[in-house]
Amino acid sequence: MSEESPGPGGQLPAEVTSFVGREAELAALARLLGTARLVTVTGPGGVGKTRLALRAAAGAAEDFPDGAHLVELGHVQDPGMLGHAVQEALRLTDSTARPPVEVLTEQLADRRLLVLLDGCEHLVDACAALVGALLRAAPRLRVLVTSRESLRTAGEHLLTLAPLAVDGVDGEPAEAVRLFADRAAAVLPGFALTPRNSAEVALLCRRLDGIPLAVELAAGRLRALPVEQIVLRLDDRFRLLTGGERGALPRHQTLRTTIGWSHELCDPQERLLWARLSVFAGSFDLEAAEYVCGGDGIDPEAVFDLLAGLVVKSVVLREEDVRAAGYRLLDTVREYGAQWLRAGGEEHRLRRRHRDWYLGLAVWGEAEWFGPRQVETAERTGQAHGNLRAALEFSLGEPGEEQLALLLAGTLWYYWVGSGHLGEGRHWLDRALALAPAPTEARAKALWVTGYMATLQGDPGRALPALEECRHQALATGDDRALAYALHRMGCAALIGDQLPRAAELFEDALWHYETIGELNSNVLMAMFELGLAALLLGDEERGEQWMSRLREVCEEHGEQWAYAYGLYAMAYSQWLAGDVRQARAHAVECVRLNHLFRDLVGIVLGLELLALLETEPEHAPDLAEARLLQGAAHRIWQAVGIPLFGSTTFNTPHLECEARARAGLTEREFAEAFATGARLDLDATVRRVLDCGAVR
């Protein structure tokens, strides 16, 4: 498992607007976080729960050495994906087939951190169960929750958040008035509270019940209307709803009315775009908005200007700290837009266009994975993770779309494997395969991807049947591409199953098929690496080095880094066999560095195991304590990969040799303490240590 070690502040986003008021609530929340392990901030939509919780978490972050982390749950609709979403937000990469709750309880057990679960009201039962399990397993964990309703679980402390004060004290403007003035100055430079407008602003804030989101939306109208006109128009809306009796309007209706009024003040195309944007789950970028929302009433070239108008009106938020995924809707605003989308009969069409865009993103990512932009591809796919989940859910839940679900889940192999999301990838693939039994190309691809990932997880019981079915289907349908991939991944299973001659034979067959059909990508390069490694393990060093040379040549020609990182492991292993420890160490360190860019745990841990062995070489100033420490660090990562060293005798032999050398040269206490020290290091700390030591050497 990989963990970030961000220090104080953790993974909290930067504030893009100023924080106004709430001094008393912040102080109360700080006190609760100091004593309670589970605190839930409740209140109606738009009241400012998220902003308060983020500010409180940032203030408390220095008390948590492992940081404060935000988990946004508004876009998570399937309770079964809750654990995966928490893992992703905490950057806890696990490649095993274990349930996420098991992974989280294990990895957070000795951590002191604050987790902010934001927007739990639609997942109350699932959140309550997960939070309860985490708090029982991790005694130094604190959880802060925002929700429109409480979790109703043991140990929960509640802070009910009311709207901002609308009446000033001792001549000072009320909090709601201060918020309006602050946001008004942002949209209308030079705006300030004056004796002439103060009374109208105060009246407006009272009409809005001091609900922060309503106040911000009203402030966004100042470019078009003066304060007096905003008040009059809102009064007209309220009278229509209540028959003239102002006190009859509940606060939740005040917010809905204000959002609806903001909706009416948008021009027709802005309203249409608002509704269509509601299909996005979390952040989205301009290109996605243009494709998904353009056409049928909106010129795609007009989307940018319309989007900019919605940003000015505070309907859409611009996320300045995100490079590619730069916009999002607040949950309350998105829900309102979704209602209009359904009312207009466009929901199904827009969700299909949304799926098609993110299917295209996955196909683009698979193609770009073989080339110099692999790291960028991993980042862009990661930013789209929430929307990819929504696209998969749509395809799995819509009759007739099962084949596209198979295609999308299978095409994302590069992300599931290369960025450490094997467990989630298996989740989607298993669901899609169960729904679509017809022997199609999409199913064949999903089968070999499933077999590949199950092999990496040390799950031959699932891997071999999936790969065998893929092979049989490929032979029956004449699908040469699927046959090549099935043979290739069966070779992987044979390699870690200590069937080295069989593995080499399967890799050779696969490479022959790849060449015959003109296939060249990162998978083909991995087959070269695996055949070269099998040759080295069989004692044929010359043949192994030939394949490594070929791999390196193709990687350099195409700028490929992911398969090259694995090739570096085989090169280092070959150099160790030849007695060139210095060069072997350099290549193993670079193997760890490159794999860390992708957060590929298998590649990282293989490099660590080899570096540990190299530290024991007697003719090169051995450091047996460091060797054992690296084995401890590797052991921790293996827990997140699956069975240590794949359960393979072949891969375990160098490990046992390293262990024996360390045990012979260290006392029992030194031996145990070094291992324990390494096992306490998280992934990033381990990699930093490897790179620092590599630089010194």
Image (spheres, rainbow, N blue to C red):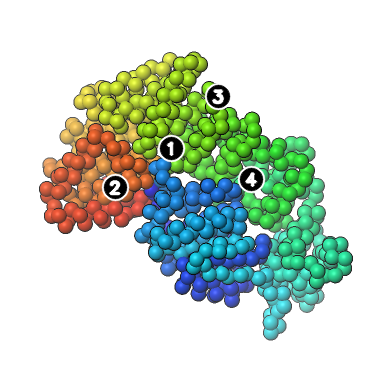
Q: Which residue is mark 3?
A: 438
Identify the residue at image location x=44%, y=51%: 101
Query: Residue 592: which disc?
Result: none
**What percent of the width, then of the height, locates residue 80?**
53, 47
Q: Is residue 578 left or right of residue 67?
A: left
Q: Which residue is mark 2?
A: 635
Mark 4 or mark 2: which is in front? 2
Among numbered discs 3 and 4, the one appearing first in the sequence: 4
What's the amino acid at mark 4? Phe
Q: Which residue is mark 4?
A: 280
Among numbered discs 1 and 4, the one appearing first in the sequence: 4
Identify the residue at image location x=57%, y=36%: 361
* Mark 3 Cα-neighbour bin, 10 Å: few <14, some 14–19, many ≥20: few
Q: Report the residue that reaches farthest toward the bottom.
A: 170
Among numbered discs 1 and 3, the one appearing first in the sequence: 1
Among numbered discs 3 and 2, the one appearing first in the sequence: 3
**What percent of the width, then of the height, locates residue 584?**
24, 37
- Label 1 vs label 3: CA separation? 25 Å
Give the secondary structure at mark 3: loop
Among numbered discs 2 and 1, the one appearing first in the sequence: 1
- Label 2 vs label 1: CA separation? 20 Å
